[in-house]
Amino acid sequence: MAKDKADKKIGKSAADHGFKYGINDLAKRLDTDPQLARGRLRRAEIAKSDKGVYGWRTDKDLDSVVKQLQAPKPKSEKAEAKPAPKPDKAPKAEKKASRAEATA
């Protein structure tokens, strides 16, 4: 017997776990959508609480996360060291002609 999607339990909010501030509060402070705020938290490698949700108990904690997400990202070494551009390829007609000369 398969459960209907409606019967599935949807994840609990931060308020259900005793947090005063959650993703929606963070999204408002960042002036963005809650889904985008979650993505930014993941990319910044900010861990969820022990209860498995993003939540903060104090305004100060939430502000520190906002500052982390708004801080300019340091450029990585990979971004600074760009590979050299590849040389232009010769047209196929020239390649065939050079092969024909080499075999003749």
Image: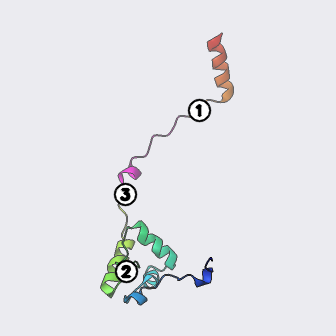
Question: Residue at label 1?
Answer: 89
Inspect the image, locate mark 2, and give the three-letter code of the amino acid beneath it: Lys
Of the two numbered discs 1 and 3 on the same chain, state the one appearing first in sequence: 3
Q: Quadrant of residue 88?
A: top right
Inspect the image, locate mark 3, and give the three-letter code of the amino acid beneath it: Lys
Q: Nearer the viewer, residue 72 or 41?
A: 41
- 20 lies above or below 2: below
- Magenta highlight on residue 86: yes
Mark 2 vs mark 3, CA separation in Å = 33 Å
Q: Are marks 2 and 3 in contact (CB under 8 Å)?
A: no
Image mark for residue 45 = none
Question: Residue at label 3?
Answer: 75
What secondary structure is found at the residue carrying circle 3? loop
What secondary structure is found at the residue carrying circle 1? loop
Of the two numbered discs 2 and 3 on the same chain, state the one appearing first in sequence: 2
Mark 1 vs mark 2, CA separation in Å = 57 Å
**Which quarter of the rendering shows the N terminus?**
bottom right
Give the image location of residue 55, x and y in percent. 38, 82
The magenta stretch spans which residues? 75-87
Question: Residue at label 2?
Answer: 51
Between disc 1 and disc 2, the foreground one is 2
Give the image location of residue 35, x and y in percent. 51, 76
What secondary structure is found at the residue carrying circle 2? loop
Give the image location of residue 51, x and y in percent. 37, 80
